[in-house]
Amino acid sequence: MAKKTLIVAGVMMVLGVGAWVTARPDRLLRTGAGVAAHHVCSMTFVGRQDPRTTFRELVVPMIGDVGGKLLTPHVLRGRVEVTGPFGGLLAAADDTPGYGCRLDLPGNRPLVADATHHAPRADGFAPEHPVSSADPRLSAALDRVFAEHAEGSPKRVKAVVVVKDGRVVAERYAPGVDEHTPLISFSVAKSFTNAFIGVLARQGKVDVKAPLGAPEWRDGRSAITVENLMRMSSGVDADESESAFSFVAKMEFLHADMAGFAAAQPAKEAPGTRWEYTSADTLLLDRKIGDIVGGGPAGMRDFARRELFDKLGMGDVTMEFDGQGTFVGSTYVYATARDYARLGQLYLHDGVAPDGTRLLPEGWVDWSRTSTLGSPYGAGFWTNDGPSDVAKMRVDGGFPKDGFFASGVMGQRIYVVPSQGIVVTRFGYSAPPTYGIEDDVGLIAAAIEAYRR
């Protein structure tokens, strides 16, 4: 896929040999250590996964083989510390029950643990045990999604759930993962941010056409609207790339106040003139949401549970926060594959909950999946709507034109096909450049064929 597919979420750090010759190794180590500390902490204490497997399959592909050899994570009680080649502490992350993991950085505000458990709603959406496909075409497509290539990049698919007309019709999980396992979202979290803004817009508390109103912006940036940020057309100079020196890498792994760091960046062009994917735009939206909701991280969690998660029947969902209490809605949500599918169902049904309650404004979903400036991105979702080559590739492969999807780096995805009543969730640690999307498109096509209307 095109260049932007490589940055559909989060950040990919490359600690390559060449970088050590031309760049500052201390910053490379600190950033890579931050990646290792955070991800191992979250997947150990939230995802309940083996830390050594997480480091090998999730972290090393991000920081590179050199980083994997130089950095060592140590799992302690509710904490992960990462040391360098000479044993010095380079980064640490702490787990707070109910809030996931957060890097130990200067300026962090305290979090109060909340171990309240929320069970998913007992309804007709999914049975107690995993569902095996009854259709051989769908089963074969699932085989292809999970099958590793004899040669080439690993796929490491962890979970797939296929939903048709509001019921799970097929699902499959890798060893050590099941229907109860919380999975990292990466940039699928941006679609949660879209949902929260949609709820506030329906309540009359947000106008997407209005300026964001960041207090730091006393210049031309004051014209940047909520919609500009949702559509990644803010014009703010905040690059997201496969580099430990990119703005987003520094924002996510070196700064306690991520949104404040994003707000401090200058404009490089007028808002609304060019699409450029950056998690900085989403962090600014998340800070705005938190300001409107009030109550800090606890208030944000209560809002999310009351206005969205409970109404969709979702069980435990972990939302992580930066050191100043802003929801990191660019990157860090943890939920089961089934619960991610429940969010997809909301968008399948134009923002209406299973009980018929409208949660998002009428027309919000169509607006969210409408292409931005001809790119393959709408507002918090990737889309087949526009004229881009990657959208055409997906449509030609059998993923219909009205389809759209939430997407995170390494292949975290929620696919929605309104015309066919289908939602597919797929999560794993797949390799670039496409993170297994060709197999996913084939799976969507097989599901449509199996349950053709």
Image (cartoon, helix red, strand yellow):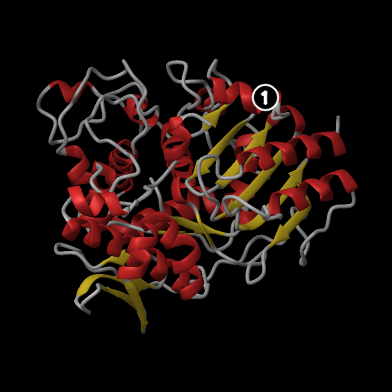
Q: Residue at x 22, y 19 (%)?
A: 269
Q: Is residue 226 above or below residue 411?
A: above
Residue 428 appears at what percent x and percent y?
Answer: 57, 55
Q: Is residue 101 above or below residue 155?
A: below
SS of the residue at dot 1? Answer: helix
Q: Is residue 74 left or right of residue 134?
A: left
Q: Quadrant of residue 335?
A: bottom right
Of residues 311 and 437, the one nearer the viewer is: 437
Of residues 85 and 220, the one nearer the viewer is: 85
Q: Amino acid at mark 1?
A: Val
Of the 4 image quadrants, the one containing the C terminus is top right
Residue where numbered disc 1 is placed: 395
Q: Residues within 10 Å of mark 1 (few under 14, many from 20)?
A: some
Residue 291 appears at what percent x and percent y?
Answer: 27, 45
Of residues 21 and 80, the one nearer the viewer is: 21
Residue 304 appears at what percent x and percent y?
Answer: 45, 51
Q: How many marks?
A: 1
Q: Residue at x 47, y 67 (%)?
A: 56
Q: Is residue 66 left or right of residue 442?
A: left
Residue 188 appears at what percent x and percent y?
Answer: 49, 45
Residue 350 visible within the image: yes
Q: Residue at x 52, y 73 (%)?
A: 48
Q: Quadrant of residue 183?
A: bottom right
In this view, the residue farthest toward the bottom is 77
Q: Is residue 440 left or right of residue 23?
A: right
Of residues 180 and 244, the one nearer the viewer is: 244
Residue 451 visible within the image: no
